[in-house]
Amino acid sequence: MPDPSPSSQQLPYYPPWGFYFSVVVDGFTGNNEGSFQEVSGLSVKISPMEIKEGGENRFIRRLPVPPKYENLVLKRGMLIGSQLTQWVRNSITQFSFTPATVTLNLLDGDASILATWSFSNAYPVGLKVSDFKAQDNNLVVETLELAFDYFQQTK
């Protein structure tokens, strides 16, 4: 017979919310440097390579190849005087790259870390500033795009 006491009852599982997160780029700390409104690019895919076996044209072996990663895309309201944005600008305009480790933390309601992803050897490959439109009442959004060697979930 099951134990009906409150300590033995488990709460139903709810997936975590995706709107509470933090971003840390090694070497860049300061006011709001890691405050982003959107992060995308947590994607990896392996596309099998097809090899035809000799003598039998209808038999094709599918072998794994190294994974391909999308670029990490970080969006936030434009931050005046940002060292992180300056790092991106310097990399692109001077073609001088200093890779950094980027850490993405998914947080719960009390700011405890639920999951962590680490992006190795990230470097800037794109910078975009949103359009200016007199008829709209929008914030200026900057988009930073970073390439990296690989990512892994560390927690």
Image (tube, grey):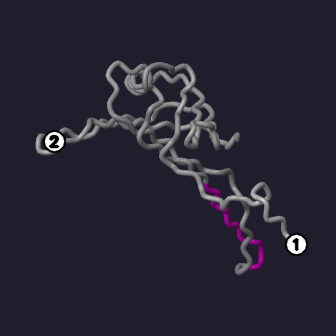
Instruction: Name which residue lies at 44% across and 24% down.
Output: 84
In which image quadrant can residue 137 be found? top left
The residue lying toward the viewer, choosing from 142 and 68, is 142
The span shown in magenta is 45-56
Say which quadrant the N terminus sits in.
bottom right
**Residue 150: percent from the left, percent from the top?**
63, 41
At label 1, the amino acid type is: Met
Asked if 93 appears above or below 150 in the picture, the reply is above
Taking the magenta stretch, the answer to whether it contains residue 10 is no
**Residue 16: percent from the left, percent from the top?**
58, 52
Asked if 37 appears above or below 48 in the picture, the reply is above
At label 2, the amino acid type is: Lys
**Residue 46: percent from the left, percent from the top?**
65, 57
Q: Residue furthest right?
A: 1
Asked if 73 appears above or below 9 in the picture, the reply is above
The residue lying toward the viewer, choosing from 107 and 98, is 107
Residue where numbered disc 1 is placed: 1
Mark carried by residue 133: 2
In which image quadrant can residue 119 be found? top right
Asked if 29 appears above or below 121 in the picture, the reply is above
Q: CA distance from mark 1 to mark 2?
A: 67 Å
Instruction: Name which residue lies at 38% across and 38% down.
Output: 143
Instruction: Name which residue lies at 41% across and 40% down.
Output: 37
The residue lying toward the viewer, choosing from 69 and 7, is 7
- Left or right, 66 with respect to 81, comes to right
- Left or right, 8 with respect to 39, comes to right
